[in-house]
Structures are given as C-alpha cells and as structure tokens.
Image (cartoon, rainbow, N blue to C red):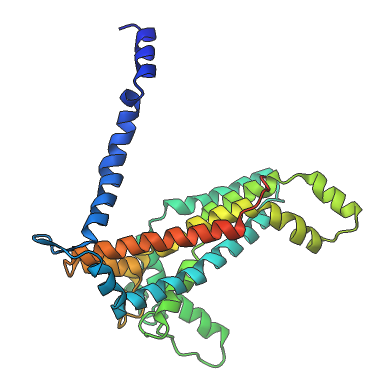
C-alpha cells in the first residue's frame, strides 16, 4: 500500500489511528471509573455483591470516621493551597528580574523538585519533625525543626515538640511540612506569566502616577488571574488526593488525628475489604473535587489572557 493510499484510508477511518490512544484510556481509566460507580451501589467484599442502591452513601454520611477524614482533608487543603500559591508567586517575583543565567539556574533548581519522590520527602520531613530521631544522629541532637526551635529559644531551653506523635499537633505537622515543600510548577508558571506581562501597561500606569502597590493590586494580580486559577485548581485536586505523605508520616494517626479521605478509602478497601463502601467514598471524593473546582472557576475566571 502506497503512502498516499494509507493516508487516505486513515483519513476515512480515524478510529484506526485513534485506537492506540483510546484503548489504554478505556482500559486504565474509563472502565475502572465505571466499575467504581457500579460498585458504589452494591455491598461488595470481593466475593459476593448485593445491590443496595443508595445504601452505601447513607451509611457513609452516618459514619463519623468519614466525617473526620473529610474535615481533616478540608483543613489540609485550606492550609496548603493558599501557602503554595503565595510562596510560588513570591519566589517567581524574586526570580524574574534576575539576569538570564541565574534566572534559568533558579528555575531549573525548582523544576528539579519533580525528580524527588513524595515518599522520600515524607521520610525526610518525618525525621526533621521527630523529637527523637533514629540512627546515627540520635546521640547528637533532636530533629532539625526542634533543634532550630531550641537554638532560637536559647538561653531558655525549649522542650522538643511531639509534632507527629500528639493528636493535637500531628495534622499541623503534616500541613506545615507539605506547605513548605514548594512545588516547582507554580514557580515556573508564574515566572512565565510575569515575563509575558506587557510593559507598556506599567509605563502608562507610572505616567498616571500609580505607585508600585497600585500597579501590583490593579494590574499584576488581575493579569495573573488565569495562572492563579489553573494553579489553584490543580493544587486543590492534589491536596484532596493526598495520601503518600500522610501514610508515611503518621499512617493516619495518632488516634485518627490525621486520617484523610484517600487514606480512609485505602483502609476501607484494602484493610477492611469493603469495596462497596470504598467505591462510594471514591465517588463522593470525585464529586467534591468537581464542585470545588467549578466554584474556583466561577470565582477566579477572568477575560485577561497573558
């Protein structure tokens, strides 16, 4: 078959070249999503299935453990997402005015954060927040955070804080460690957006007597709204799906003080083998993410495109 004949055949039958893309999508995304939605209406333990309609959802919303997990996830999101947005914007503002070489170097450095496994980051923060670290550093000093607090409080000694061992402090410890693990995506996107802002607008504002704060408030922030919207949505989704950090750092403890939705879903499915209830949790989580994302689009959308 000649090249022209092959192109004509593909043009007449687009499924021939869309198939290699759509088949993995169907196998690993669409079919699992449909199966989860189906199981959410059943009582299923991996062997037997009994149709219960909305019974799993009614049971779910009467479950205090699910309510606590939802509250913990909401607090985690409220603590992490605004911090990530603010820190990435401030870092981008500091990087953009630099000369080309240091700007590229700093941008590359933040981009390299993608190469670090979330499990490794969770293990490092677990040591940093630990009052009594294990291993070779055990005889030298307590965890890095407590050591810094002790040095800052000198000459009065500050006792090591049980960041991850206290039910009252564990969730705060997880939130702080996550918020300070700055995602490089926000730095790169804000840096690109700031570099693309039209300088003539600022020149006109200066001629009108606008100061730096007025330019920032009425020009920069509105023009960055599309970037802020995108980052807010993807960071919110990532926060609602948090699992590795909580599982490694606290395992949902102590006493369920850090249990989040995905960790609760995992325990329900693979420790309790209640696949019907776990599927209902997954459906509720997807609906919450969709509603929150839609609300964010409505609040932050704008007509500016830079």
36 to 268, vertically: above or below: above
95 sits to left or right of 284: right
Identity of the residue drawn at 35% across and 74% down: 69
In which image quadrant can residue 71 be found? Answer: bottom left
103 sits to left or right of 158: right
Q: Residue furthest front?
A: 53
Q: Residue furthest bottom?
A: 156
Residue 109 appears in view: yes
Q: Residue furthest top?
A: 2
Give the tally of numbered discs. 0
Image quarter hosting the N terminus: top left
Given residues 246 and 112, the one toward you in this image is: 246
Q: Position of residue 73 (x, y in %)?
A: 41, 71
Q: Position of residue 84 (x, y in %)?
A: 54, 63
275 sits to left or right of 216: left
Identity of the residue drawn at 43% across and 86% down: 160
Image quarter hosting the C terminus: top right
Identity of the residue drawn at 35% across and 29% down: 18
Q: Position of residue 20 (x, y in %)?
A: 30, 30
Identity of the residue drawn at 18% across and 67% down: 274
186 sits to left or right of 10: right
Given residues 45 and 82, the one toward you in this image is: 45
137 to 226, vertically: above or below: below
């Amino acid at each position: 078959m000649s090249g022209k004949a092959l192109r004509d055949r593909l043009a007449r039958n687009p499924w021939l070249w869309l198939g290699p893309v759509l088949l993995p999508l169907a196998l690993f995304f669409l079919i699992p999503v449909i199966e989860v939605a189906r199981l959410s209406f059943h009582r299923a333990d991996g062997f037997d299935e009994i149709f219960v309609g909305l019974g799993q959802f009614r049971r779910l919303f009467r479950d205090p453990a699910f309510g606590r997990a939802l509250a913990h996830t909401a607090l985690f999101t409220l603590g992490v997402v605004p911090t990530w947005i603010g820190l990435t914007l401030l870092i981008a503002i500091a990087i953009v005015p630099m000369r080309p070489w240091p700007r590229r170097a700093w941008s590359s450095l933040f981009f390299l954060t993608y190469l670090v496994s979330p499990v490794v980051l969770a293990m490092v923060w677990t040591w940093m927040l630990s009052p009594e670290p294990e291993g070779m550093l055990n005889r030298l000093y307590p965890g890095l955070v407590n050591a810094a607090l002790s040095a800052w409080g000198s000459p009065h000694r500050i006792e090591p804080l049980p960041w991850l061992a206290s039910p009252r402090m564990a969730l705060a410890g997880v939130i702080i460690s996550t918020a300070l693990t700055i995602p490089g995506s926000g730095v790169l996107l804000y840096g690109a957006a700031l570099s693309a802002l039209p300088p003539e607008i600022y020149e006109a504002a200066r001629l009108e007597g606008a100061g730096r704060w007025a330019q920032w408030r009425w020009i920069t922030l509105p023009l960055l709204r599309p970037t802020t919207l995108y980052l807010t949505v993807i960071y919110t989704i990532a926060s609602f799906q948090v699992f590795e950090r909580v599982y490694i750092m606290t395992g949902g403890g102590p006493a369920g003080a850090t249990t989040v939705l995905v960790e609760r879903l995992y325990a329900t499915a693979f420790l309790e083998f209640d696949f019907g209830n776990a599927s209902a949790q997954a459906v509720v989580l997807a609906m919450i993410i969709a509603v929150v994302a839609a609300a964010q689009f409505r609040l932050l959308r704008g007509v500016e495109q830079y």
